[in-house]
Image (cartoon, rainbow, N blue to C red):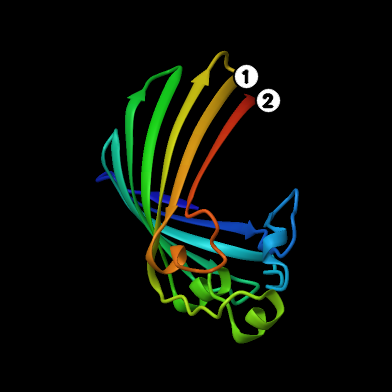
Amino acid sequence: YDLQSDSGLYLEHTLGYSLGRSDSNSNWRDGSDKLKGMGNINATVNTAVAVGWAVTPWLSLEGKTILPLSDGQGVKYQTSITLLPIQNETNTVAFQSAALFGDSRYMNTFYGVSRNQSFHSGYAQYQANSGFYGVDSTLTWSHQFTPHWSTAANIEYTRLVEHAKDSPIVFKPNQTSATLAFIYNF
C-alpha cells in the first residue's frame, strides 16, 4: 500500500521475494562457483517499509527497511535521495543514490565466513560487523513512445565499502550493470 500526504510525506509497504544466493554459477539467481563450500542462502519472502518526503516534484528523500518473513537472513536498511531533472509527458530521467546498511545477521549471511564455511570453502573466517556497507547509484531514463509502448534504460553502480568490501568472498567491490527494457501496456 501507499499512503501520501499533501505535504509530500509518504509511507509505502511492499511484499517481495529474494532469490538468495547459490554456491555455484546460476542463470537465475546470484551465485558463483567461487563460493563452493559456502552453502546456499535460501530464497525468502520479505516485506519493506519506506518512509519518505517528496521535498519538491523533482527531489525526494527516503528511509527504507527490508525485513525477511520466511527466513532469518537479517535486516537491511537504506537511505536514499532521488532527483528527477527531467519529467514530462514523454521522458523521465531519475538519479538515485542510496547508502546501504545491514544488521549483524544480514552482514554475516551475505558477507561473513563462519568456521564451518571456512573449513568447506578454504576461505579465512570473517566476521562482518553491522552498519554501513555500500552505496548504490542508479540512473534511469524512461521514454513513452505511444500510450501502449515505452522503453526504460537503467545503469546501476554499486560500491561495497568497509565491512562488506573486506570479506574474503567479495571479489569485485565495484559492480556496474545495465538494463534495457521495451514495455507494452495493455
Q: In this rendering, is residue 33 above or below 129?
A: above
Q: Position of residue 126 (x, y in %)?
A: 51, 78
SS category of the residue bearing label 1 = loop
The residue lying at 69 percent from left, 58 percent from top is 32
The residue lying at 40 percent from left, 58 percent from top is 134
The residue lying at 75 percent from left, 53 percent from top is 26
The residue lying at 52 percent from left, 53 percent from top is 172
Q: Position of residue 175 (x, y in %)?
A: 50, 47
Circle 2 packing at 10 Å, graded few (<14), some (14-19), many (20+), is few
Q: In this rendering, is residue 115 above or below 42?
A: below
Name the disc covering residue 56, or none: none
At label 1, which amino acid type do we have?
His
Q: Is residue 108 left or right of residue 121?
A: left
Q: Is residue 53 left or right of residue 68?
A: left
Question: What is the quadrant of residue 137 in the picture?
Answer: top left
SS category of the residue bearing label 2 = loop
Q: Is residue 135 left or right of residue 119?
A: left
At label 2, which amino acid type do we have?
Phe
**Does the residue at mark 1 contact the one at mark 2 (Cβ under 8 Å)?**
yes
Q: Quickly name the residue at label 1.
A: 148
Name the disc covering residue 186, or none: 2
Q: Position of residue 7 (x, y in %)?
A: 24, 46
Q: In this rendering, is residue 39 above or below 158?
A: below
Q: Nearer the viewer, residue 123 or 9?
A: 123
